Amino acid sequence: MRFTLPDFFSNDIGIDLGTANTLVYVRGRGIVINEPSVVAVNTRTGKVVAVGAEAKVMLGREPPDLKAHRPLRDGVIADFEYTEAMIRYFIRKVLKNSFFIRPRVVACIPSGVTDVEMRAVRDSAERAGAKEVMLISEPMAAAIGCSLPVDEPVGSMIIDIGGGTSEIAVISLGGIVTAKSVRIGGDEMDEAIINHMKNDCNLQIGYNMAEQIKWNLGSAYPVFDKELDMTVKGLDLIDRIPRSVVVDSLAIRRVLSQPLDGVIMAVRQTLESTPAELAADIIDRGIIISGGGSRLPGLDRQITKETKLPVRLDEEPMTSVVRGAGKIIENFAAYETMLSVLKD
């Protein structure tokens, strides 16, 4: 009689390999990792010294012999070596007592990636210890995570705004009918704030400060009863000494309008290419938004203003994609037609 290990002993993992954060779901345990996608390396030895939250606090503060890297850009792998090191670290962290079992991995990828970029994700996971790597597009995973009826003959529209990309898709009968992927997300918003501080205030700031400004003052629509302000600290570009300035929420809303216009244009383009029957469903059912960038205050109201459609924010937008991957690994049979397995 042939012996096979029962599913209880398998280590199936879902990974949302995001530009800003990496989230990991382990079968039977739920979400066990939610950390920044950052790797810190000793520049003399090449050794990885920190990963995740510990590495992120080093950004912009490193001594000459230490460098913190963000190995993913615009939703795809920019540095293969450091991405592999990061995935290996997270896999070992969640399966520290199960080294003898190589996990099956469901990895979430942007819908607009190339075959080369897809293979880079697969190869990184395999070299990090995965037995098998299956891929699913981020908007499909987000829709599953948001409990949309993706396998039914009805149109569901999802907008997933991550750190590097915004994914817009209309889904029906287990497939993506029409989609748009734009390399605009939280990073683009941070860049816009950095450029504003540089050009309008002669102040150089880092990404951590830009992120603080975005979440303290940022909005996509006038939602504050009274405009807010905060003190921003950085390096004076003229005198080259530390200086602080006061910035208000109205200025930041105007700054963020440019990257957000790119997202809304992609939403309109997706709607324009949606079949009439599914368009009617979206009028009735509305649009759901997810991802870290969707938490920007007033974004739902701004999209409604531009599209005349009801928009709803997912209850846990930061984890929508990885929750979708989690549902898949908990029930592979129900979602196997939505997965891709690359062959060499």
Image: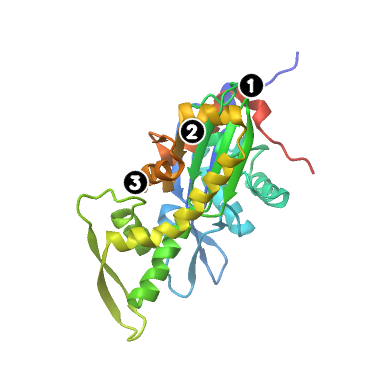
Q: Of 192 and 268, which appears nearest the observer?
A: 268
Tag 2 near tag 1, CB within 8 Å: no
Quadrant location of the C terminus?
top right
Type of amino acid at the residue the image marks with label 3: Gly
Which circle's residue, 3 or 2, is located before the other in the chain? 3
Q: Which residue is mark 3?
A: 298
Q: Of 172 and 56, which appears nearest the observer?
A: 172
Q: Secondary structure at mark 2?
A: helix
Which circle's residue, 2 or 1, is located before the other in the chain? 2
Left or right? Give the position of 252 relative to 185: left
Q: Secondary structure at mark 1?
A: helix
Which residue sits furthest top?
Answer: 1
Tag 3 near tag 1, CB within 8 Å: no
| Image-quadrant location for residue 92 | top right
Type of amino acid at the residue the image marks with label 1: Ala
Type of amino acid at the residue the image marks with label 2: Arg
Q: Which residue is mark 1?
A: 333
Assess disc 3: are there few (<14), some (14-19) or many (≥20) residues with their C-alpha within 10 Å of its C-alpha. some
